[in-house]
Image (tube, grey):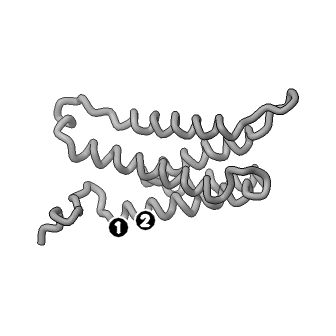
Amino acid sequence: MDLSGIGFVETSTPQHILLIRLAFAAILGGAIGFERESHAAAGFRTHILIATAACLFTLLAFEIFHLSDVISTGQSDPIRSIEAVTAGIAFLGAGAIFQSRGSVQGLTTAAGMWLAGAVGVAVALGYYVIALAVSVLAVIVLA
């Protein structure tokens, strides 16, 4: 049965695995953001969104890489997507940092956002144990 007519596409990674990775990224992002919730505006929900978005962008980049014809020509570079994700998170992190009368605040929140994005990328690539270990370390450091 061909489901492509209603929006389903063939993927190099089974779609249920993609969904599991997205859910795992959301859980780990939430764990990192949970501690920030009481200290900063960018807390639980923000970190979930960052980790999940980073995971999704990475998954999509590698699916495009696997499905495109540019593989054979060597013109495709999926690492550029990860660089774009990093730049986007840096932009959000810069928004979390502010200066007030000579003191800078929000650096820890920005670093947590950046780390949540990295965790999302790690999960997308299938490095579950590394992502979990880094998330646990982040929660310990933030606590």
Disc 1 residue type (three-letter): His
Can you tell which quarter of the image residue 82 is in? top left
- The residue at 72%/36% (across/down) is 97
Can you say which quadrant of the picture contains the C terminus? bottom right
On the picture, is 112 further left or further right than 66? right
Asked if residue 52 can be seen in this view, the reply is yes
- Tell me the tag on residue 47: none
According to the picture, the residue beneath numbered tag 1 turns out to be 16
Badge 2 local density, few (<14 within 10 Å), some, or many (20+)? few
Q: Nearer the viewer, residue 133 or 101?
A: 101
Placement of 15 over or under 125, stated as above or below: below
Left or right: residue 107 versus residue 129 is: right
- Residue at the image position 48 percent from the left and 64 percent from the top: 23
**Regarding mark 2 in the picture, which secondary structure is present there?**
helix
Who is closer to the viewer here, 59 or 53? Answer: 53
Residue 16's quadrant in the figure? Answer: bottom left
Q: Which residue position holds label 2?
A: 20
Q: Amino acid at mark 2?
A: Ile
Residue 12: percent from left, percent from top: 26, 55
In this view, the residue farthest toward the front is 101
Q: Position of residue 27 (x, y in %)?
A: 57, 63
